[in-house]
Image: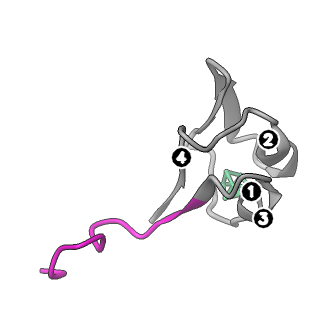
Amino acid sequence: MRIVIDGGLCCGSGECIKACPEKAITLVDGKAVVDEERCDLDGLCIPACPKGAVGYDEGGNLGGCGF
Ligand code: SF4
């Protein structure tokens, strides 16, 4: 599992950056990007985003049969 930020929705407000205690999010070309090495998956950035652009990617369960 990991945190994913939809670059199409991201408004670059930086609210997720302020919410992240691990300083795992930075703005790259005006869009928030997560450093997976730093992220501890606490999810604090998810409600912080005013655009709903941040969420968990469950990984591999997005349409496949799971095997
Ligand atoms: S899940 Fe937590 S540690 Fe990871 S980027 Fe979001 S606020 Fe930071």
Mark 1, residue position: 45
Stretch in magenta: 55-67
- Residue most extreme to the top: 29
Q: Which of the marked residues, 4 or 2, is nearer the chain's N terminus?
A: 4
Mark 2 → mark 1, Cα distance in angstroms? 7 Å
Residue 37: quarter of image = top right
Q: Are marks 4 and 2 in contact (CB under 8 Å)?
A: no
Mark 3, residue position: 47
State whether residue 20 is above or below residue 44.
Answer: above
Q: The C terminus lies in which quarter of the figure?
A: bottom left
- Checking the image for residue 17, the label placed there is 2
Mark 2 is on which residue type? Ile
Q: Residue at x 68, y 58 (%)?
A: 52
In the visual, does 38 lie left or right of 65? Answer: right
Q: Are marks 2 and 1 in contact (CB under 8 Å)?
A: no
Of badges 1 and 4, nearer the viewer stands: 4
Of badges 1 and 3, nearer the viewer stands: 3
- Checking the image for residue 6, the label placed there is 4
